[in-house]
Image (tube, rainbow, N blue to C red):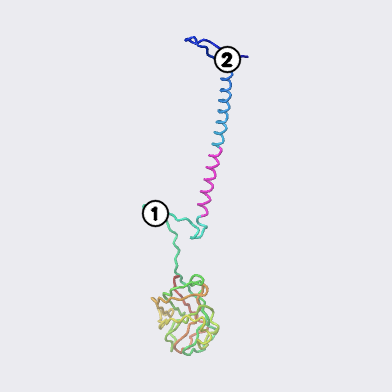
Amino acid sequence: MATAIDVKDAAGATVSVATNDAVKTSVDAVKTSTDALASLITTLDGSVDAVTAAVLANTAAVTAGSVTSLGAKTIANSPAVNIASDQIVAVDQKSLAHDVAVTVTRPANVTAYTAGDVVGGVIQFAAAGKNAGSILINGVELEYDVTALPSGMSTFRLYLYSATPPSALADNAVWTATADKAVYLGYIDLGSPILLGAAFLYASVDGISKQRKLATADLFAYLVTTGAYTPAANSEVLKVTLHSADL
């Protein structure tokens, strides 16, 4: 089948032109290419939709995971957060203050104390600060549950330790610093207890501002009388309250 024939143009010159069959073949080829291109575009469009859906799903998962994990990260591994100047953010602020009360029960006797004797043995103020951290001791209270001031009772002193004193002195033992030097943290004078309404004796000291380093979270102490006195009854109860704050 001829794909071209010779004809005369208006000037009488011979020119070669494509036959109808040749033109039809070219048109069919173009149509086939166009159909293939349209099919490819449809396929690409579907792929783009699938990629878009996957990106959106992954973005949502990453965003949700990041938000969920923010609170579980350390400060060093958390991204910075910028708060808008007109935004109010609620803060769950936990107090750094500690108020630790310890009850001390004297032995069942009325044995007299001499000046410098321990009352009740070792006292442990549990969770007086953060573990191995520094605290600021702000105040101490002493409550002595008797209804009259014992004869001879004057002031008390609270000796402080970072760990259980190795001396392990019991009630009515003479206080000594020799064995406890490695853990000794100084002392606080509590003053003279006064009788409140014929109900109990009370002494307190505030504004101490004594900074001390703990070995654990606990603080240890001896309560020592500075004056000789005779207990009024067996098994008297005392309460020592320590007020401190973490640094």
Asked if the magenta segment contains residue 65, the reply would be yes
In the rendered image, the quadrant that contains the C terminus is bottom left
Disc sitting over residue 88 in the figure: 1
Q: Is residue 121 magenta?
A: no
Quadrant into which the N terminus falls: top right
Q: Amino acid at mark 1?
A: Ile
x and y, in percent, of residue 171 in the image: 53, 85
62 or 141, nearer to the observer: 62
Q: Which residue corresponds to mark 2?
A: 4
Magenta residues (range) = 50-69
Residue pushed farthest front? Answer: 13
Residue at 47%, 88% in the rendered image: 116
Residue farthest to the right, as pictured:
1
* Amino acid type for the residue under numbered disc 2: Ala
- Residue 61 location (% of width, % of height): 54, 47
Mark 2 neighbour density, 10 Å: few (under 14) some (14–19) many (20 or more): some
Residue 191 vertical placement versus 74 (above, below): below
- Quadrant of the rendered image containing residue 151: bottom left
Name the residue: 54% across, 79% down: 164
Kind of element beneath mark 1: loop
Q: Who's the residue at 50% across and 56% down the image?
A: 71
Q: Alpha carbon of mark 2 to alpha carbon of mark 1: how far? A: 84 Å
Q: Secondary structure at mark 2?
A: strand
* Residue located farthest toward the left when viewing the structure as drawn: 86
Of circles 2 and 1, which is in front? 2
The front one of 139 and 167 is 167
| Main secondary structure along the magenta-highlighted residues | helix
**Residue 230 picture location, percent across and down:** 48, 88
Dots 2 and 1: beta carbons under 8 Å?
A: no
Q: Return the disc, 2 or 1, that comes first in the chain's sequence.
A: 2
